[in-house]
Image (cartoon, grey):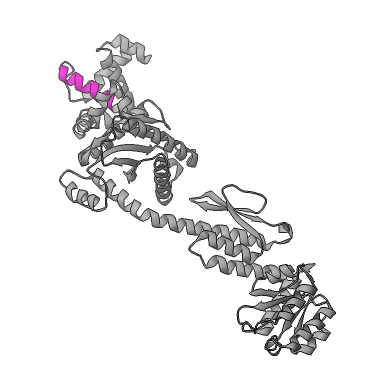
Amino acid sequence: MTMLADLKDAPGLRLECVARGADDPEVECVFVAERLLDLQNAPSKSVAVLGSHVCAAVDGYQFDIALRMAVARGVAALVLSEPSTPPLTSTSVETARRFGIAILRQTDPVNLADLVTTLDAGLRGSAELALRRAVEAFQRTTAMAPDPAAMVEDVAKAAAAEIVVRSEPDGELSFPVEVDGEPDRWVVVRDASARSRPELVLVGRLLADTLALAADAARRAEELPIRSRAELLSEILDSSEQGRSELLRRARAMGLPIDGWHVVVRIEHDNAEELWREEVAGFEARQLLGRTVLDAVRSTGGTWHLAWTERSVLVIRMCRNDPGPSAGAQATKSANQALQEAIRRFPDAVLYCGVGTAHSGSLGLINSAAEARAAVAASRTRNRPGVATAFDNLGLRRTLVEWYASHTARKAIATVLAPLDRMSNSKAEEAIKTLQVYLDNHGSLSKTAAALHLHRNSVAYRIERIFSELDVDPDNPDDWLLLQLACRARGLA
């Protein structure tokens, strides 16, 4: 059973009601009247489409008579096919109201045959109506209205169904709007006859995909300045002092508060090569990790910017004025929240995080980044993935960490331990561990053997071989101290 209200909203029709009764009549067929007298043959429960000659006469008494013929025949509605039809007489309006017959007018110019065909398809329903609705919904969707809410409303009207966007799925016909591979919102189609309307599945899925494309385009437009700033900050952190001035000028021109105060959070992804063996996949994952971390820290407040190094993601909180002594603690809290979100998005990732302290100026940015790198090294030594380690909380190790963060210290360590590093990885690791325990036990072979669970003679053989490789004097206190520092600092690497 098709009611007039359902037929009036069929896709492709642009009908307005100019007169009607209180009821919503049932409709069974479509009838064409080229002359007023044709209405005396109109079937009961029909929609009578009036041709141009009839429409031209609606403001005369002949139409009032024909309208009474239609009422007597049980016609459900008259459709005026011409948008420029003259106004109805007050008698015609009162007759329609009293006897419950509706008078509709096509608002857009249309071929009479097309109007009749569309009405007939809307009346028959089934596959043809579903296809028409799906096609019109598709046309509305691909129009890509600038306002997503307006597009959803437009598509819902074309599909003759209630369609809403929600934060969670609700019912069978819920379609995810995926952003970065995860549902951001859901398109929910609510219709009592959904099971008998398969076109709603097509419409809902198409609308969800279109909203996802729109969200992705908006994100890309928003990320263009973010990427530009991120690339510039990455260059600054990787530049030499001589080549930094031009980069700083560009940063100021971009509006970055490079001369303010900075706290750097560094996140290193330890097993990226294992998870993404293809270079493109790894690059995209690192980009997504950066966006995830940046969005998470920004949600905690403050102004944050993104940067990258070869193996790390950095987020930098920038303040134009001194943020005070609590800046490091606040950044650590933000970093922990960002880590939790990153782990949720990448459950198999092994992430180490370090947080520097607040420093001012461009040199302060470099120093805070070095502290964050050193804090990551300490976090790795302590085997604490997934937890932010603040440089402020390193205790007695801080002096060693600060020393190791410098280029000079790393070069000295690489030089003194180079002969051992030329061994295979396992032998080099074994030699450095043996040397560190030996040095920590003040050169005691017995204590070293006990600590390593080895025979004293085995330890003596190893130590003799190690010192034969190293270019140091074991009896020189300065060389002894350098070796101790090198072994301990190597543990941070």
Viewer-closest of 483 and 193 = 193
Residue 313 at x, y percent in the picture:
35, 42
Residue 446 at x, y percent in the picture:
31, 9
Viewer-closest of 231 and 324 = 324
Please report the bounds of the magenta region as a residue range.
Answer: 474-489
Residue 8 at x, y percent in the picture:
69, 71
In the displayed structure, would residue 35 be above or below residue 169?
below
Q: Please identify the quadrant where the N terminus is shown.
A: bottom right
In the displayed structure, would residue 117 be above or below residue 468?
below
**Residue furthest out toward the front:** 90
Instruction: Say which residue appears at 60% left-offset and 58% top-offset.
Output: 205
Relative placement, left or right, of 168 versus 232 is right
Magenta region, main secondary structure: helix
Q: Is residue 100 visible?
A: no
Q: Is residue 208 visible?
A: yes
Instruction: Say which residue appears at 48% left-offset and 63% top-offset.
Output: 146
